[in-house]
Image (tube, helix red, strand yellow):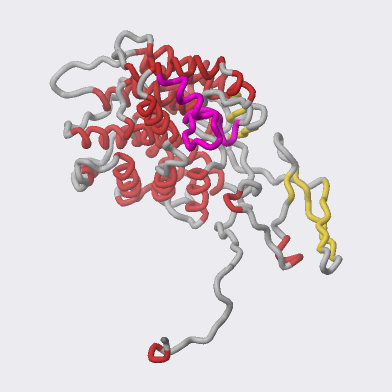
Amino acid sequence: MDPQSSAAATVVPRETVTLIDNSTDKRVELPLLDGTLGPKVIDIRKLYSLTGLFTYDPGYTSTGSCESKITFIDGDEGILIHRGYPIEDLAEHSDFMEVCYLLLYGELPTAEQKEKFEHDITMHTMLHEQLTYLFRGFRRDAHPMAIMCGVVGALSAFYHDSTDITDPHQRMVASYRLIAKMPTIAAMAYKFSLGQPFIYPRNDLKYAENFLYMIFAVPCEEYTVSPVLARAMDRIFILHADHEQNASTSTVRLAGSSGANPFACIAAGIASLWGPAHGGANEAVLNMLQEIGSKDRISEYIKRAKDRDDPFRLMGFGHRVYKNYDPRAAVMQKVCHEVLDDPSVRDEPLLELAMELERIALEDDYFIKKKLYPNVDFYSGITLRAMGFPTSMFTVLFALARTVGWIAQWKEMIEDSSQKIGRPRQIYTGYAKRPYVPLHQRG
């Protein structure tokens, strides 16, 4: 295998913009950069040295922190592409292992490359046996994400041969280990919460199929993974594999900028994803459905959602980034209905309620006008519940899928010579310098 390097190339400035300081009439020329897609970008790297000023941008929503070739999002047009390929095409024609290869190496693999990649990942799915004792250190009612943070961070204590970030081979081995072991860790966290024995991975099963087997199988009886559910799980992984410079990805890059080992960086990403504003949206959808309770109350809650003075909001509709529609939602909608039609899926009143809410919202002029379409979280929460996952596992599955995106972004950052340790600035609004008052003089 001769994977293509994903090292970033330097963007060459072609134009400039002029910054004018009205207090001094000083003018500063700043380079204007062009990416392959997206708006022009003002290069402010020398702003402070030239002017003594820096920018203020809470949440960094108007600041580019890096140059990347991995993922592009156009929220206004509803576009999400990985390495140039639309997410819809990848979800329809690829599998998760192929998407992993694409994110890591920049190109879709040949048949030979894909076979070797899948083999290499499969050979890393088992955990060091001593790690199983670490699980027993958690309370049985520990949240699976707490276990994930701890166990992934602890990997660096077991795999010393893949923590040297300056060695390309060690970076590759660490990447493969993380992608391979995350399903095993997630499944063990789930089994531990149930008090069931761990189910070890099987090398004869595909990635998503093997994960479902480790989640739902028990030693006392045969378990056969439904092909429909395995394909659904695979596409869910694809849809969540990477999403540009979001909170958790930026956390991974920031942690990695200090030279931290890859296992620590991914553990940091998991911790960031755990926040309800980031990875908990699909769980919020189910909480909302439970609050609505029955089909005959949908119109009441639709009316409340339209009332600006009512704090109630329909969860799973609209998206912070996608102002038109979420391109992942159409794929997830199809997956959702395929899962609900599978004979192995149990009847669930909450799922029927969700489908009725979807139908009403898609026909309502208010939601159509405001482009409040069901997003990927609306369908993924329903689908995962139908597949048998408790809500406590939803963010764990998100972390499992996003691991490859975090790794690809981390790897790109390490190989980018223009990157440096992250050091955001601040506007200080505390006390100015003041004299120290001895304790006996304080009244």
Image position of 64 (left or right of 163): right
Which residue appears at 27% of the width and 38% of the height? Answer: 127
In this view, the residue farthest toward the left is 220
Viewer can see residue 367 = yes
**Whether residue 350 is situated above or below residue 160 in the rendered picture:** above
Q: Residue at x 28, y 34 (%)?
A: 126
Q: Is residue 215 left or right of residue 442?
A: left
| Relative vertical location of residue 246 with respect to residue 212 in this rendering, above or below | below
On screen, residue 355 above or below 121:
above
Quadrant location of the C terminus? bottom left
Q: Residue 235 versus residue 105: which sits nearer the camera?
A: 235
Residue stretch in magenta: 297-322
Residue at image coords 44%, 15%: 356
The picture places residue 129, in percent across and down from the top left corner, at: 22, 41
- Give the residue at x 42% y 19%: 354
Please state the horizontal and vertical placement of residue 234, each as a whole percent of the image. 42, 22
The x and y percentages for residue 59 are: 57, 50
Say which quarter of the image contains residue 337: top left
Majority SS type along the magenta span = loop
| 187 lies left or right of 295 | left
